[in-house]
């Protein structure tokens, strides 16, 4: 741990100013920010705490920026929190309410740093909603790459990591694995809307889903049941597929951002939740293939 921290300190102190502006480590002396430790603490509170820290989890660095709400002055940490177990990527921020949980990417013994950086950065660029200047984006990417290149090989050499990330076979644990627990709600968490959806569209055994109800048009969105998936767009009839139909024709991203194409039919989620579609597709296909028990 000490060797990693020393290398990170050396990297920070000898980096260009643009990188120093977006890199924060547990070190009292920061070349630019006198509130470095406060920024790290805020990132820990906003990114790590909602997910829950692992036993003996240690933060190595925060690579990121802040989104500031003009009215309240509230700052939200956006970017990458790197620990001795994982990278947590936060792209959401709250003007009102609570931000969505960060994406989790766990470290293993067999990963290459460039593979981790490529996946994490690609996911960030797809999901990020904050307008960030190009120079700052380049600095974020460069700092993320360098931190992972310092941290991951040493954790692997210290025999600190598992050989592979084992996926949960329980649906509720898998929802947590994919960072969907705040959005893919269980029946008990959204009972009123699910009951309405079930009665209106003759759908039984709802396990979880992602639905909404505007002032007009009734409940719409997508639900996962013991028998398959059912979805409904506003002012439209519901569409249903069995798990066997999805196994035969797996779920993919449709021709619009809010559409999932599965079992040769189009299913929708509320458009403001379209960034979750890749993770929802993952869980749908894993259920259809028997990898997740429901």
Image (cartoon, rainbow, N blue to C red):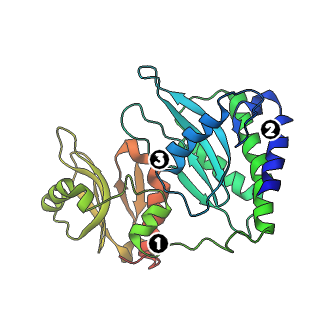
Q: Nearer the viewer, residue 42 or 240?
A: 42
* Quadrant position of the C terminus in the picture: bottom left
Tag on residue 101?
none
Q: Nearer the viewer, residue 170 or 48?
A: 48
Q: Is residue 105 above or below residue 47?
A: below
Q: Report the residue at 72% width, 45% height from top.
A: 144
Which mark is first along the chain, 2 or 1? Answer: 2
Q: Is residue 148 above or below residue 281?
A: above
Q: Tag 2, which secondary structure?
A: helix
Give residue 102's position: percent from left, percent from top: 52, 49
Q: Tag 1, which secondary structure?
A: helix
Q: Nearer the viewer, residue 258 or 79?
A: 79
From the image, tell me which residue sits under label 2: 12
From the image, tell me which residue sits under label 3: 275
From the image, tell me which residue sits under label 1: 286
Q: Tag 3, which secondary structure?
A: helix
Q: Is residue 102 visible?
A: yes
Q: Report the residue at 86% width, 35% height from top.
A: 14
Q: Report the residue at 69% width, 69% height from top.
A: 161
């Amino acid at each position: 741990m000490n060797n990693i921290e020393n290398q990170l300190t050396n990297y920070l102190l000898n980096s260009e100013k643009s990188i120093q502006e977006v890199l924060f480590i547990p070190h009292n002396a920061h070349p630019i920010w006198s509130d470095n430790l406060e920024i790290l603490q805020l990132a820990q509170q906003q990114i790590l705490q909602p997910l829950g820290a692992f036993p003996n989890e240690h933060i190595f660095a925060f690579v990121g920026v802040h989104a500031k709400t003009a009215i309240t002055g509230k700052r939200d940490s956006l970017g990458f929190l790197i620990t001795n177990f994982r990278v947590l990527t936060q792209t959401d921020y709250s003007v009102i309410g609570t931000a969505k949980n960060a994406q989790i990417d766990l470290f293993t013994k067999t990963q290459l740093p460039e593979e981790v950086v490529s996946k994490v950065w690609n996911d960030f660029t797809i999901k990020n909603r904050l307008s960030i200047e190009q120079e700052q984006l380049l600095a974020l990417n460069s700092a993320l790459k360098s931190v992972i290149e310092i941290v991951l090989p040493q954790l692997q050499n210290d025999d600190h990591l598992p050989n592979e990330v084992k996926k949960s076979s329980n649906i509720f644990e898998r929802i947590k694995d994919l960072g969907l627990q705040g959005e893919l709600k269980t029946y008990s968490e959204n009972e009123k809307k699910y009951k309405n959806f079930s009665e209106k569209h003759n759908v039984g055994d709802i396990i979880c889903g992602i639905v909404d109800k505007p002032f007009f048009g009734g409940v719409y969105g997508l639900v996962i049941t013991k028998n398959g998936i059912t979805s409904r767009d506003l002012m439209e009839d519901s569409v249903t597929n069995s798990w066997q139909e999805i196994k035969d024709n797996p779920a993919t991203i449709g021709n619009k951002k809010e559409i999932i194409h599965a079992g040769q039919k189009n299913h929708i989620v509320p458009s403001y939740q379209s960034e979750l579609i890749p993770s929802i597709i993952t869980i749908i296909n894993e259920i259809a293939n028997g990898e997740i028990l429901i």
